[in-house]
């Protein structure tokens, strides 16, 4: 599927997908904050959850 024929449906689908992305990233962040994973070098490469939410809001479709 390359485009949505109905902007309202497309907007709700994209919004739902972005909401799930934020929820999964938050869970992933919580897992990596457990004592077992605190020594992993990849933790320093993660972006802050707030920054992710700001970027998602920037690209939120407004129809």
Image: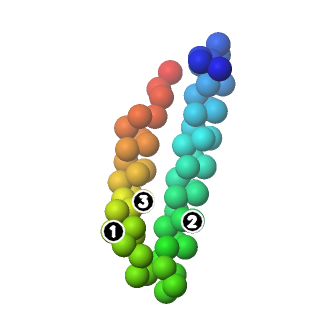
Tell whether label 3 touches label 2 (CB within 8 Å).
no
Judging by the rendered image, the residue that carries numbered circle 3 is 49
Task: Where is residue 40? Give x, y as percent.
Answer: 41, 76
Task: For residue 48, say whether it is visible.
Answer: no
Decide which of tag 1 and tag 2 comes sooner along the chain: 2
Horizontal arrangement in the rendering, residue 35 relative to residue 50 (left or right): right
The residue at the far top in this view is: 5
Crowdedness near tag 3: few (<14), some (14–19) or many (≥20) residues, C-alpha within 10 Å: few
Q: Nearer the viewer, mark 1 or mark 3?
A: 1
> Mark number for residue 44?
1
* Residue 54 x, y percent position in the rendering: 37, 48
Element marked by disc 2 = helix
Q: Secondary structure at mark 1?
A: helix
Residue depicted at 57% across the width and 65% down the height = 27
Q: Which mark is residue 32?
A: none
- Provide the secondary structure element on which disc 3 rests: helix
> Which color scheme is applied?
rainbow
Task: Give me the C-alpha separation between circle 1 and circle 3.
Answer: 13 Å
Foreground: 31 or 7? 31
Residue 15 placement, left or right of 47: right
Q: Is residue 34 above or below residue 55?
A: below
- Res. 27 mark: 2
Residue shown at 41% from the left, 34% from the top: 59
**In which quadrant is the N terminus drawn?**
top right
Mark 1: few, some, or many residues within 10 Å (few <14, many ≥20)?
few
Q: Earlier in the sequence, mark 1 or mark 3?
A: 1
């Amino acid at each position: 599927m390359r485009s949505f024929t109905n902007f309202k449906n497309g907007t709700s689908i994209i919004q739902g997908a972005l909401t799930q992305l934020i929820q999964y990233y938050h869970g992933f962040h919580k897992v990596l904050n457990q004592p077992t994973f605190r020594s992993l070098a990849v933790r320093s490469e993660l972006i802050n959850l707030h920054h992710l939410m700001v970027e998602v809001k920037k690209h939120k479709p407004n129809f």
